[in-house]
Image (tube, rainbow, N blue to C red):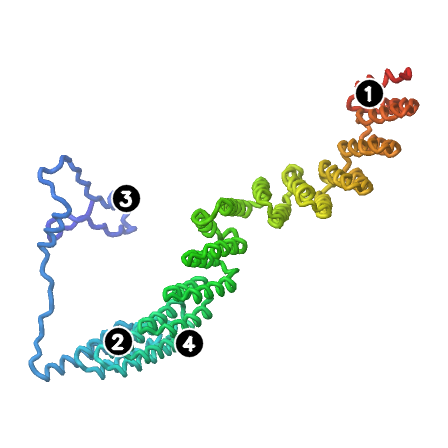
Amino acid sequence: MALTTRGGGGADQAQPPPAPDASLGFLTKRDTEVKLPRATRVKNKTPAGVQITAEQILREARERQEPEIRPPKQKITDVHELADYRLRERKRFEDLIRRVRWSVSAWVKYAKWEEGQKDFARARSVYERALDVAHRDHTLWLKYAEFEMRNRYVNHARNVWDRAVSLLPRIDQLWYKYIHMEELLGAVANARQVFERWMGWRPDIAGWNSYIKFELRYGEVERARAIYERFVAEHPRPDTFIRYAKFEMKRGEVERARRVYERAADLLVDDEDAEVLFVAFAEFEEKCREVERARAIYKYALDRVPKGRAEDLYRKFLAFEKQFGDREGIEDAIVGKRRFQYEDEVRKNPLNYDSWFDYIRLEESVGNKDRIRDVYERSIANVPPAEEKRYWQRYIYLWINYALYEELDAQDMERTREVYRECLKLIPHKKFTFAKLWLMAAQFEIRQKNIKAARQILGNAIGMAPKGKIFKKYIEIELYLGNFDRCRTLYEKYIEWSPANCYAWRKYAELEKNLSETDRARSIYELAIAQPALDTPEVLWKVCCPCCPLN
């Protein structure tokens, strides 16, 4: 059974039963468990006739809320009550700061209360005691100095500011407030002296800009110019030089502004934000109606700024050429934009040889030899990562095109020979080779009337990586030159390398037959048909049989 007690409100509340005694063996688990009241089911789920919103509930709760209990106002009628009040408050503040000694807000509240009592000496004493605890908190120095300024203790405020900026020279707000106070007092010389102290700590750009604006407010242009010189020496960045040049331009000093830009261009040509500087320099020349100067600046920048950071520069140059340039200039700008796109593609994926081919065609259409060679050299530097022929098939055509360009367009035969030599040296011939490249190198030497070099190249090809195409072309060359003994030697090497090749046997025999060496031809056919595994023996038999009666 469930054990319950009657509460004061008349409701039955379930209480846990006492722990059963181990000696009472007649109690079961059902007798000792607690039975909770059954949940009441909602029978009527239809909406009420009168609906009430959450806003109405909150408004009624606010209206029925009891008024806030506030302590009664005390009226101090004589000096003794005032002294008692001050004693109680000071004791409360002292107890507070004794408990939370590191709380700056507690000290500030104490000092403000003393200030409200017009006891400035005590307030100042509270601030000094607080500074002994938290002199690294710049907000405390600000509150202290503002207290002195608010009550017109100027010399005291200066003393506070001096101590603050000496201890915390990297807090710009302290310097700004100090200078602002001196300006409000009309002490321009003192403010300038504070600025000089601040500049000795080498602040950031905002500090230098505030110093320049301060001098300009009082019409000290020469002083501002001298500060700008120190500014760009301290922070040699494109934005600081641009500020300096705009300052000179605003005062009509065009030559001075140009000298500033030229000095920045020489100094910051390798800076990561050099693009911004060159764009500003070109726009400055454009405003001065110096179109050729602006064009020269754009071209100078495009040659030196890395392609990955020159997107805005190309866009500005194209817009400039469309406005001021002729047809040739616009085409150059368009080529520059396409060049930028190709540079971006090959930078993202240097092994995309199709992008290199497009880039090379673009440069060849322009005709700048130095640029063409530079792109070729950069492209062939991206060697395929694996020594498999399928990865090299597109890459090898970069070398072929490079060699053809040097021979046909640049007319530099020595560089052509060097390109072929380096390419043949690079290919791993033990795993695969390119017969086309060997033959092109040999044909180039033949065109240069250097038969010895051509024979050396083809001989190296047969020795390092023999292929049927190389044998055929080499024999064809020697046959054309009438060197039949060399042809016989090459056919022997060909057959030795590929004894099952019926084409080699047949051509060798045909050579001997054409030279009227019938016995040699018959012997070659006999050796051929004696081979155990020929690739196309029927072709050899068809040619061999009519040869037996000595046709």
SS category of the residue bearing label 3 = helix
Q: Which residue is mark 4?
A: 200
Establish if 321 lies above or below 502. Answer: below
Judge left or right: residue 65 versus residue 425: left
The answer to whether residue 61 is above or below residue 406 is below
Residue type pointed to by label 1:
Leu
Q: Position of residue 441 (x, y in %)?
A: 74, 40
Write down the quadrant of residue 247 in the picture. bottom left
User: Badge 2, how many Cα within 10 Å: few under 14, some, many 20+?
Assistant: few
Up the image or down, 426 lies above or below 246; here it is above
Q: Residue at x 8, y 79 (%)?
A: 76
Is tag 2's residue or tag 1's residue first in the polypeptide sequence? 2
Sequence-first disc among 4 and 2 = 2
Q: Is residue 447 left or right of residue 46?
A: right
Query: Reading the chain from its start, which is encountered first: label 3 or label 1?
Result: 3
Q: Nearer the viewer, residue 512 or 430?
A: 512
C-alpha gap between disc 1 and disc 4:
99 Å
SS under mark 2: helix
